[in-house]
Amino acid sequence: MLTWRHATTACLAALFAALVGLMLAYPNEAWKAALQGLSIWWDILFPALLPFFVISELMLGFGLVHFLGTLLDPLMRPLFRVPGIGGFVMAMGLASGYPVGARLTAQLWEQRLVTREEGERLVAFTTSSDPIFLIGAVSVGFFHDVSLAVVLAAAHYGSCFLIGLLMRFHGRKSVPTPMHITEGRQGIGLMKRALIAMHHARIQDGRPLGEMLQEAIQASLRLVMVVGGLVVFFCVFLEMLNVTHLLRGLAQTTGSALRLVGIPLELSQAIVNGLFEVTLGARSAADAGDHLALVHKVAVGAFILSWAGISVHSQIVSLLNRTNLRYWPFIAARLAHAVLATAGVYLLWTPLASVRSAVSAAFPQLGPSLETGAGVGGGAAEAAQYGTGLLPWLYTASIGLLLMVTSLLLLMGALYALGRPLLRLLFQHRPLSR
């Protein structure tokens, strides 16, 4: 008797066989799509992700993650119902982009530092676009207007924070993990407990620096290769669907949904592309047509960035494959994030108009031309050149964002931890009444 698993296996086998047949029928289109995916991986993803992967591995080995987790626990647990170590995952996810949050969460789960429900909450709100891609590729490279990064970043990252607050209601109260139990000892200051946690983590790891660095690079390269392979695969897959006109039906269905919310039907193809691959979807939204209102195109771009595409979803699933974390909380959070980010663009478009004008005045070479309305005098090649030139500065800005978010979280955690003793000290030393 055939089961559901047998039917699923047969459908997937037929799908991949059909994909091979299409690649043989359209070899030129498949080759160009593969080269496009390889270019995306080599030019953007590889330099943006590899250093952060290596750094995160080293920070885990030296116990710095445990140190930050102990300090941030008084902040992260009341807000997001995750241990303080989630603050490190949050900072790294915001600074380095989509798969990093899932990668770190999986590592924390393997070390028994988070429970299943805590890990599902973490992955849900730490999966976001990195600033390099949002500013350099989307705002400058695709839309040719750096000022749009203000609206996109506010809507995208602000929605991440809202998703974290919403996901705190996911699941029941979790049992404290072993690290929480060691942190709960009374009579020891917060900083001392953080140092003890870092020292114990370093002793348990025990690897010398050379071995740790070698293994961190090897593991990071394997993960980056997996990410690149998935990007190339989905670029080819989407191109095969495009050349056979199989996407038209899905685009028509999407257009019917867009009509209900007042978004132009011309953007339906961009959303369909973005459902599969975020880069192709964002580029399609930017190239949808000059006659469309810019706010609609940016809103669709925010939707695609927050949904992240099935390509990123596949990366997340592959990273979480060795854990017991479920996929459905992640996909529900992606849908909610996409809707919130889209609404955020419409809500913030007018209030942030003055900020956009100031950014355009500060970077006139990266803003729209007065004659054509297109970026950098209307030349796509010049826009790509300026976008590529911004990458080193954006890379530095991403590291700065990581340090800033971590410092802010540490400050908020310290204020939260010191607030009660300080209030108690003030009230105990009130002056005597006459």
Image (cartoon, helix red, strand yellow):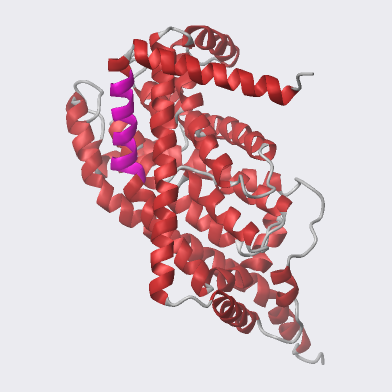
Residue at 72% of width from left, 49% of height from top? 168
**Which quadrant is the C terminus positioned in?**
bottom right
Residue at 66% of width from left, 67% of height from top? 73
**Which quadrant is the N terminus positioned in?**
top right
| Residue furthest front as drawn | 1
Q: How many marks?
A: 0
Q: Is residue 316 left or right of residue 28?
A: right
Q: Is residue 406 left or right of residue 363?
A: right
- In which quarter of the view is residue 401 placed? bottom left
- Give the vertical position of 243 relative to 52 (above or below): above
Q: Quick one: 305 or 75, which is closer to the camera?
A: 305
Q: Quick one: 346 or 62, which is closer to the camera?
A: 62
Give x and y (percent) for residue 28: 27, 16
- Give the vertical position of 307 relative to 286 (above or below): below
- Give the vertical position of 256 relative to 377 (above or below): above
- In which quarter of the view is residue 113 placed? bottom right
- Give the vertical position of 327 relative to 16 (above or below): below
Residue at 37% of width from left, 53% of height from top? 50
The answer, for residue 166, to whether it is visible in the render is yes
Decide whether residue 229 is among the magenta residues: no
Q: Magenta segment, principal secondary structure? A: helix
Q: Is residue 11 left or right of residue 353?
A: right
Decide whether residue 41 is among the magenta residues: yes
Instruction: Read off the magenta span.
Output: 30-45
Q: Quick one: 152 or 117, which is closer to the camera?
A: 117
Give x and y (percent) for residue 359: 31, 43
Give x and y (percent) for residue 187: 74, 87
Give x and y (percent) for residue 316: 55, 42
